[in-house]
Amino acid sequence: MRNALIQALGLFGDKPVIARARGLVISGAGSAEEQRTALSVTAGQADAATFAMLLDRARKTSDPLERERIYDALGGVQDAGLASQMIKIALSSEVPAGSNVDVLFPLAQNHPNLVWKEAIPHFGDPSAAIPKLVQWELVRAIGELSADPGRIKDVDDYVRTNVP
């Protein structure tokens, strides 16, 4: 319950919660559960420097679980410019195999139109490594999350063109 409250306060931009979370991430202090919560808050509210620090940490760690946790957390980034960078990373081979969807879904929750514009056109690219069924689920999710009324036609067009 406490961690859910901390995540909610972080999501709503509570500065003391964000500062404490960043401090925990940087220091490595706290329990594993506190570290996961702190990572989620820190990544969600990341500025460019924090985003770069977390990416660097993900790229340098030899622990595959830690790498995956960091990339997954960065999928929750609120800043649209950083989200755009994360979309490119999620579609690359940098994200561990099978984890790109765990990054794209939270990005779609926060930035559905951005993910539509920047990720959907790359679904046909084999290097994106997203199974067809997962692509279709992401298209559906973006359609549900978007407030753009034109997205209905976009989803229909995508389905007509890409789904047998």
Image: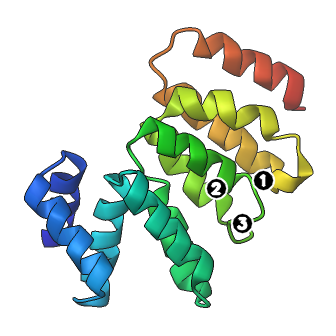
Q: For numbered disc 2, what is the local secondary structure?
A: helix
Callout 1 amino acid: Ile
- Rounded to the nearest angstrom, the CA distance separating label 1 from label 2 is 7 Å
Q: Residue at x 51, y 82 (%)?
A: 66
Q: Is residue 82 above or below residue 40?
A: above
Q: Quadrant of the N terminus?
A: bottom left
Q: Quadrant of the C terminus?
A: top right
Query: Which x, y percent locates residue 49?
Result: 40, 58
Mark 1 touches mark 2? (CB < 8 Å): yes
Callout 3 amino acid: Glu
Image quadrant of residue 161?
top right
Question: Mark 3 or mark 1: which comes first in sequence?
Answer: 3
Q: Residue at x 78, y 23 (%)?
A: 158
Find residue 101 and name its label: 2
Q: Which residue is mark 3?
A: 94
Categorize mark 1 by other alpha carbons within 10 Å: few (<14), some (14-19), many (20+): many
Residue 129 visible? yes
Residue 1 visible? no
Q: For numbered disc 3, what is the local secondary structure?
A: loop
Which is more toward the observer, 48 or 120? 48
Query: Which x, y percent locates residue 25?
Result: 31, 77
- Rounded to the nearest angstrom, the CA distance separating label 3 from label 1 is 14 Å
Query: Which x, y percent locates residue 39?
Result: 35, 70
Query: Which x, y percent locates residue 137?
Result: 66, 42
